Image: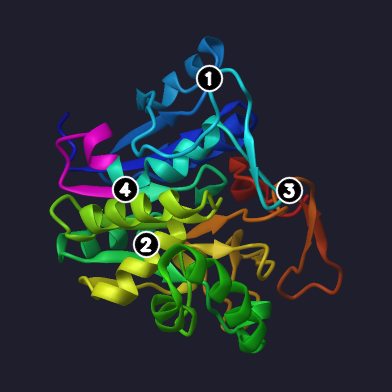
Amino acid sequence: MNAKSIICTGSESRFLPICLCLLRSIRDQQQTDIDIGVLDLGLQPEESAQLSPFGPTIVKPGWDIDFERPAAGSGSITTGNKQIGEGFKAMVSRPFLREHFPGYETYIWIDADAWVQNWWAIEWLIEGARRGDLNIAPEMDRSYKHSFNFREYVRWTFEPHTTLFGEKSAKRVAYNPTLNCGVFSMPANHPAWSLWADAMRTALSRKVDFFVDQLALNHVVYSTEPPRCLLPSQFNWLANMAMPAFDPVTRDFVEPAIPHRPIGILHLSGNTKSAPREVRVIGHEKPWKTWLVYDPKRKENGIS
């Protein structure tokens, strides 16, 4: 291990195709010495073998926190409309990346359904960690639909925070923008790692919530105010909140609003990874129907 930084992600079988897209986007854009770590969340041996060309360290995590969970071989349990099985380890293991991939100065997490379009996003995530911060983007942007329906947004976040951490914490957290932990970076010595793990233990002892990792991290940030830097949306563009536009000149996905700044990391959140989407093309009248997953041919050929 020569690299000082590692990009971590996790995948189960159903996420393998888009996880491979993420890994390929990292290696294709790479301009810095960096390692990749993958949490194996139930991949078959032949599926794990498909990761090999990208040179990752593959770790099979156990359950890092003891809580009421599916018994071995029992499939999954349900919380709300989400099924929780082995893939839930991606949430539970997130505060324990240092233990699963020891020895690095900087840890970057990118969800398997996101991909790197521009390497400057990784460089700034590394630099932010070097400065001692948790670096993370809020779910707020002038183009995001919910940014102008704040009352409904608060209502959506207040209830789960109350259940997991109490009303006092919920009032503090719900009136701040939710920090999306699908993309973040932290130095190894950051205090939020242990605080996050403790908050997760508390939360999972009260209720198994699919978004427990994000709820717990938001509780830590807004309750203890550890060193952090809130990033622009281009570092974790949430496609289900605002479909990106496409610039046919640079052949990049960009913000839909002027000045159409390029996106660094595109996150295919929600159902935006399940089918082709209509994307507005800058300077064109007709939209372009395309998959949003990483495709190196898009950069070569543009609109087809």
Callout 3 crowding tier (Cα within 10 Å): few <14, some 14–19, many ≥20 = some
Q: Earlier in the sequence, mark 1 or mark 4?
A: 1
Residue range highlighted in magenta? 97-107
Distance from disc 4 to disc 3, alpha carbons, whole Å, reads: 32 Å
Q: Earlier in the sequence, mark 1 or mark 3?
A: 1
Q: Amino acid at mark 3?
A: Trp
Relative to 92, residue 182 above or below: below
Q: Foreground mark, 1 or 4?
A: 1
Q: Foreground mark, 3 or 2?
A: 2
Tell me the residue that label 1 is attached to: 72
- Image location of residue 106, percent across then percent down: 21, 49
Distance from disc 2 to disc 1, alpha carbons, whole Å, reads: 28 Å
Distance from disc 4 to disc 2, alpha carbons, whole Å, reads: 9 Å
Callout 2 crowding tier (Cα within 10 Å): few <14, some 14–19, many ≥20 = many
Tell me the residue that label 3 is attached to: 291
Q: Secondary structure at mark 3?
A: loop
Q: Secondary structure at mark 1?
A: loop
Tell me the residue that label 4 is attached to: 95
Q: Earlier in the sequence, mark 4 or mark 3?
A: 4
Q: Foreground mark, 1 or 3?
A: 1
- Image location of residue 208, percent across then percent down: 52, 48
Tell me the residue that label 2 is attached to: 217
Relative to 4, residue 131 above or below: below
The label number, if any, that marks residue 303 in the structure image: none
Residue 37 in view of the camera: yes
| Left or right of residue 211, residue 169 in this image | left
